[in-house]
Image: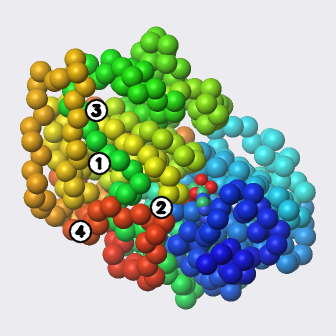
Amino acid sequence: MSFADLGLCTELLKSVAEQGYEKPSPIQEQAIPAVLGGRDMMAAAHTGTGKTAAFTLPMLQMLSAGKPVSANQARALILTPTRELAAQIADNVALYRKYLNLKSTVVFGGVKAGPQMKKLLPGTDIIVATPGRLLDLYQQNAIKFDELEILVLDEADRMLDMGFIHDIKKILKVLPAKRQNLLFSATFSQDIRQLAKGLVNNPIEISVAAENTTAETVTQYIYGVDKARKAAMLCQLIKDEDWKQVLVFSRTKHGANKLTKILDGQGISAAAIHGNKSQGARTRALADFKFGKTRVLVATDIAARGIDINLLPHVVNFDLPNVSEDYVHRIGRTGRAGSHGEAISLVSADEFDLLKDIERLIKKVIPRKTLAGYEPKQELPESPTTFKPFRAQKAKKHNPRSEHHDGQRGAKPAAQKPTSARRRSAGGQAKQGKDVWASATKNKSQNSSRPRPVSGNR
Ligand code: AMP
């Protein structure tokens, strides 16, 4: 199947070809014709499946057939939880709309509203926004929705986790009733289905991502190492293996800052990205990393969510995440779109319970390696080779009404041992070694019920 077979116009085919996309991904194959047909949609798909193009391409085609937008109006709204995601989606929209006479704008919190208001003055065909800032702009009459035709809720599960439900409801109230709705979520939990009830109308349901899978294109391994030697070992690995672009995950902001300093001190250029950094610093750090100016980007989980870097070769878990599912999200930053990637975890003995939980979730014992000179004094016990299923648990809710949210406010220190509340449901569904780019299955939403955790220390 080609993009042309999906009914896309020549202008879009041209920009898609410029991006080097040879054929549509599974979600694109399913979503593009459905959206072009005017259907509402619920899609279970996470970042890395090509979902942005799946909704953006048909949206652009539909908008290009309509009337030009009026002042301060928007014809399509893409709501997304974080500034990074908003900026990334907006970048993609700008690339795809290159040969069409359409305008797009992005708005998010943490930066001045004035310039955003100015950009909205002539109207915009597509606005990409985080919920809080969009509401602020609406309340100041900078954006109006009388001409709105299409609404996309992207990463809906994450938006609910981040406490945006009230903002979303307020936004829905001011949109015209007659519109096309597209809802994207990593999963269809009960909360998402509840939200969908008042939102989508006779939707087509699409699911492309098996739950908690790790792609075959990612080689995973762990190094057992004493906690105090992790930073030195990482420097050694980066130098020995000559890694040029490494995304390193740290459980805490403080840890991320500390590690960045150590790496820099060793002549390895590094930057940290987390909720305490200003928007400007985060954007700069990401851009420098993408373009190879910085070799290592040290990130907390939420700050890194959705970071879209083509062909990112290495992801390192400096600490294992408290929430096992975050391991899957973290390593999903590499090995994307069919390219090969490596995910390396530095694991100290006190993290063994976290490791066991992760291996149980992905139903796989991660191969181990040792680095000469860094053999741990406190050895990592052997992993069990049989996996008991996780018990499903309801996610705890909190309500941070802030786009600066990084999941870290009021954070408790990281516990050594995962509590049952941190253990997440895989419902025994994890299928190992599946590549989401090759695993499209229609109407599998019943497999997608997973409560999302809210961890206090990411
Ligand atoms: P997304 O899931 O939207 O975050 O997309 C993940 C990555 O896949 C992005 O870097 C896109 O540029 C890339 N991508 C999207 N569609 C295709 C395609 N059909 N072929 C190859 N790469 C793609």
Mark in the foreground, 2 or 3: 3
Task: Indicate if the residue with disc 2 has its beta carbon within 8 Å of ligand 1.
Answer: yes
Mark in the foreground, 2 or 1: 2
Circle 2 Cα neighbour tier, 10 Å, few/some/many (<14 / 14–19 / ≥20): many
Residue under label 3, please give it.
346
Task: Indicate if the residue with disc 1 has its beta carbon within 8 Å of ligand 1.
Answer: no
Q: Is residue 345 left or right of residue 235?
A: left
Q: Is residue 156 above or below residue 89?
A: below
Circle 4 Cα neighbour tier, 10 Å, few/some/many (<14 / 14–19 / ≥20): some
- Report the amino acid beneath label 1: Val
> Within the displayed image, which quadrant is ligand 1 positioned in?
bottom right
Q: Is residue 405 left or right of residue 287?
A: left
Splitting the image into 4 quarters, where does residue 100 fall?
bottom right
The numbered mark, 3 or 4, whose residue comes first in the sequence reads: 3
Residue under label 4, please give it.
427
CA gap between label 4 and label 1 equals: 15 Å
For the point 28% across and 42% down, which residue is it? 221
Nearer to us in this view, 114 or 307: 307
CA gap between label 3 and label 1 equals: 16 Å
For numbered disc 2, what is the local secondary structure?
Answer: loop
Q: What x and y, as percent, mark residue 437?
A: 48, 66
Q: Is residue 119 above or below residue 25?
A: above
Residue under label 2, please give it.
46
CA gap between label 2 and label 4 equals: 18 Å
Residue under label 1, please give it.
323
Q: What x and y, as percent, mark residue 407?
A: 42, 42
The numbered mark, 2 or 1, whose residue comes first in the sequence reads: 2
- Report the amino acid beneath label 2: His
